[in-house]
Amino acid sequence: EAQVTQNPRYLITVTGKKLTVTCSQNMNHEYMSWYRQDPGLGLRQIYYSMNVEVTDKGDVPEGYKVSRKEKRNFPLILESPSPNQTSLYFCASSRTSGSYNEQFFGPGTRLTVL
Amino acid sequence: RKEVEQDPGPFNVPEGATVAFNCTYSNSASQSFFWYRQDCRKEPKLLMSVYSSGNEDGRFTAQLNRASQYISLLIRDSKLSDSATYLCVVNQAGTALIFGKGTTLSVSS
C-alpha cells in the first residue's frame, strides 16, 4: 500500500530533551516536507526537500533540523524542544515539486513539550 | 508576504443544501491550486485540483480566476459525510505549498 508513515504518533517530552520524528514514504517520491498545524494558524511548512541531500527552509524552520540521506526517509529533529513546539506535525511527499503534484500526508504526530 | 485567505466559517447547513467556499491568494506567480479536505485533526487529503478552465467531480465544482486571484469550491446536495474542514492550497512550483487556515463545514440532518 502506498503510504507515508510517521513515528511516533504521540509523544510527550520535556524541555531540552532531543527528539526525532521519523517519516518514511514508499512511493519513490522526490519531494518531501514537514508541516506543523496549530489552532488558528493552519498548516505551516517547516522544511522541505526536493531530493536526496537537498533541503531548504520553509516558513517556520527555527528550532528544527532535517536530513535527507535516503530518498524514502526525511526525519525531523528537535535538538532542544521548547513548549512553543507543542503542535501537530505532518510529513508529506509528492512525486516532484512541480505543478499539480498531489501531496500525500502521513497520519500526524502529536507532540507535547512540557 | 505569501498568503491564502479563506472564508472564516463555520458553515452549518442542512443535508441537501448547496454551499460555496471562497479563497483568495496574494502571489500572482502561483502556478497550481488545490482543495484539500481534513477530517477532525487527521491528515489532509486531496479533494481536487483546480484548473483554469474550472473542473467538476460529481457534486463538487472548483473554479479558478487568475485575474482576480480567486478560487472557489461549490458543493451541491450536501451529505453528512461532507462535514470536514476544507483547505485552499496554492503552490508556486519549486517552493512551499501555502495553505489557507481552512473553512469548517458541518452538515446536519
Image (tube, rainbow, N blue to C red):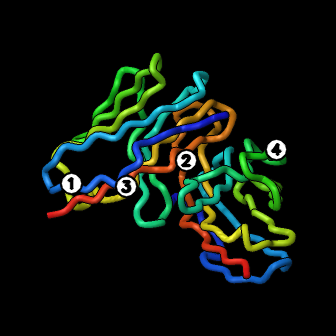
Q: Amino acid at mark 4?
A: Val
Which of discs 1 and 4 lies nearer the camera? The answer is: 1
- Quick one: label 1, few (<14), some, or many (20+) residues within 10 Å? some
Establish whether labels 1 and 4 are both on one chain. no
Q: Chain of mark 2?
A: A
Q: Calculate the distance from the C-alpha at mark 1 to the C-alpha at mark 2.
A: 29 Å
Alpha carbon distance from label 3 to label 2 = 21 Å
Q: List the residue tagged with mark 2.
A: A103
The answer as to whether the residues below labels 1 and 2 share one chain is no
Amino acid beneath label 3? Thr
Residue B3 image point, x, y percent: 59, 37
Q: Which label sits on residue B13?
A: 1
Q: Is residue A57 left or right of residue B7?
A: right
- Displayed quadrant of residue B63: top left
- Residue lying at 42% horizontally and 66% vertically, measured from the top left: B40
The reply, left or right, for residue B52 in relation to residue B31 is left
Q: Which mark is residue B104?
A: 3
- Front residue of this view, candidates A102 and A88: A88
Query: What element does badge 1 sit on?
Result: strand
- Closer mark to the observer between disc 1 and disc 2: 1
Say which element carries label 2.
Answer: loop
Task: Confirm whether circles 3 and 1 share one chain.
Answer: yes
Identify the secondary structure beneath mark 4.
Answer: strand
